[in-house]
């Protein structure tokens, strides 16, 4: 019998990190073909300093255009790859357009779809990411959920077959990275920062800055807080800030330290040393919780409501008064739970997936309707 072969698709930075974390365990049990996309020429540089990075066999590059155009381009490329490789399954993480396109292509080609991060929901269907999550979940066949709430979300939508509570791969990644970051990272020294004497601002969603006047109030409230602010700036957001005529205000502030994109290890060290994190990213919200750093979320809802319920995340939206008040007064009131697992998600996912795919090969498990009980 031929060895089992799985295709893994990764497009965004968090997906790369998860792919690297899971690949170590997958490749002990089966062959893996890694397909990557996105603006990074060499995404392995993002995580090569904390784990041996898997080498991609296919790089789709930076796919551009509207959301529909990008999905169509991805589907055409993935279809060709599936024809060449004929995998036993296709594995995706997260909620990007490339993830949805990969899942649709796999379904059309008759390959089982493995869904890591299954069941994440914000209940805000106006958000493109939410639509991608829902659509991808409902055409997938094997589901690995990071939290029990995600399992409940799937059950509420009629999905209960082949659903597994595995924990979150980001716990695995952060457990490995944090130790190395404390030993080797010099990011605090290079930026002239002192431990627990600054806050980290990480804006990843262009929608946060879509209205220039709202964006100005948000940035001004953070700058005027009296806190040392470290802004991790990626090129997309820098362009948005320039369009909103805000980059000059930021650069002229003596309380703001601008940084370019950094390695995962350095960013983890930066987060660990902060007093608070301010972000519109669900990924960073979750990482802040795992690292026990209070998080101020520039959103009205979250896919990680658990961290809000536990008192470690405050949702403030883009209300400048709420932001200023949260910076000054927010302190976690709850006791953290191990809701995201204990750092063994990669082992659980790899072993369970191997067993389920073997059953499918033997005809004892059908990859068909995912809503069957």
Image (cartoon, rainbow, N blue to C red):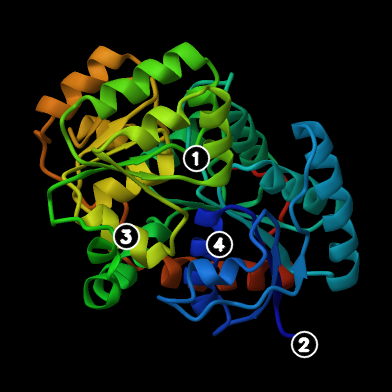
* Whole-percent x, y for residue 307 in the image: 27, 37
Mark 1, Cα crowd under 10 Å, few <14 / some 14-19 / many 20+, is many
**Closer-to-camera residue (129/233):** 233
Question: Separation of disc 4 and disc 1 at Cα?
Answer: 20 Å
Residue holding disc 4: 16
Q: Nearer the viewer, mark 4 or mark 1?
A: 4
239 w.r.t. 147: above or below: above
230 w.r.t. 216: above or below: below
Which element is circle 1 on?
Answer: loop
Mark 4, Cα crowd under 10 Å, few <14 / some 14-19 / many 20+, is many
* Whole-percent x, y for residue 292 in the image: 19, 50
Q: Quadrant of the C terminus?
A: top right
Q: Nearer the viewer, mark 2 or mark 1?
A: 1
Question: Separation of disc 2 and disc 3 at Cα?
Answer: 43 Å
Picture residue at 62% right of the left edge, 28% below the top: 128
Closer to the N terminus: mark 4 or mark 2?
Answer: 2
Picture residue at 33% right of the left edge, 50% below the top: 287
**Closer-to-camera residue (282/136):** 282
């Amino acid at each position: 019998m031929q060895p089992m072969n799985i295709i893994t698709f990764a497009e965004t930075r968090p997906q790369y990190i998860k792919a690297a974390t899971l690949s170590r365990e997958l490749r002990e049990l089966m062959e893996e073909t890694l397909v990557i996309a996105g603006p990074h020429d060499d995404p392995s540089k993002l995580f090569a300093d904390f784990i041996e990075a898997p080498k991609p066999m296919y790089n789709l590059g930076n796919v551009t255009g509207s959301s529909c155009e990008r999905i169509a381009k991805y589907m055409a490329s993935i279809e060709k790859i599936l024809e060449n490789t004929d995998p036993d399954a296709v594995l995706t993480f997260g909620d990007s357009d490339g993830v949805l396109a990969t899942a649709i292509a796999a379904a059309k080609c008759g390959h089982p779809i493995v869904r890591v991060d299954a069941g994440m929901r914000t209940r805000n269907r106006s958000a493109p990411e939410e639509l991608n999550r829902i659509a991808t979940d409902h055409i997938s066949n094997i589901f690995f959920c990071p939290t029990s709430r995600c399992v409940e979300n799937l059950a509420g939508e009629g999905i209960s077959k082949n659903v597994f509570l595995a924990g979150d791969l980001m716990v695995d990644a952060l457990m490995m990275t944090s130790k190395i970051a404390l030993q080797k990272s010099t990011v605090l020294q290079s930026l002239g920062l002192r431990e627990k004497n600054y806050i980290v601002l990480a804006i990843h969603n262009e929608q946060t800055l879509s209205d220039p006047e709202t964006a100005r109030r948000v940035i001004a409230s953070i700058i005027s807080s009296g806190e040392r602010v470290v802004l991790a700036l990626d090129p997309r957001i820098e362009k948005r800030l320039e369009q909103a005529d805000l980059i000059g205000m930021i650069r002229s502030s003596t309380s703001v330290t601008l940084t370019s994109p950094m390695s995962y290890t350095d960013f983890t060290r930066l987060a660990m040393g902060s007093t608070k994190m301010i972000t519109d990213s669900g990924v960073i919200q979750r990482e802040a919780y795992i690292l026990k750093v209070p998080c101020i979320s520039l959103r009205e809802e979250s896919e990680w409501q658990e961290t809000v319920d536990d008192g470690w995340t405050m949702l403030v939206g883009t209300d400048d008064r709420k932001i200023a008040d949260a910076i000054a007064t927010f302190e976690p009131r709850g006791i953290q739970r191990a809701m995201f697992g204990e750092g063994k998600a990669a082992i659980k996912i790899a072993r369970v997936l191997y067993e389920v795919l073997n059953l499918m090969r033997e005809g004892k498990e059908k990859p068909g309707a995912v809503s069957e009980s």
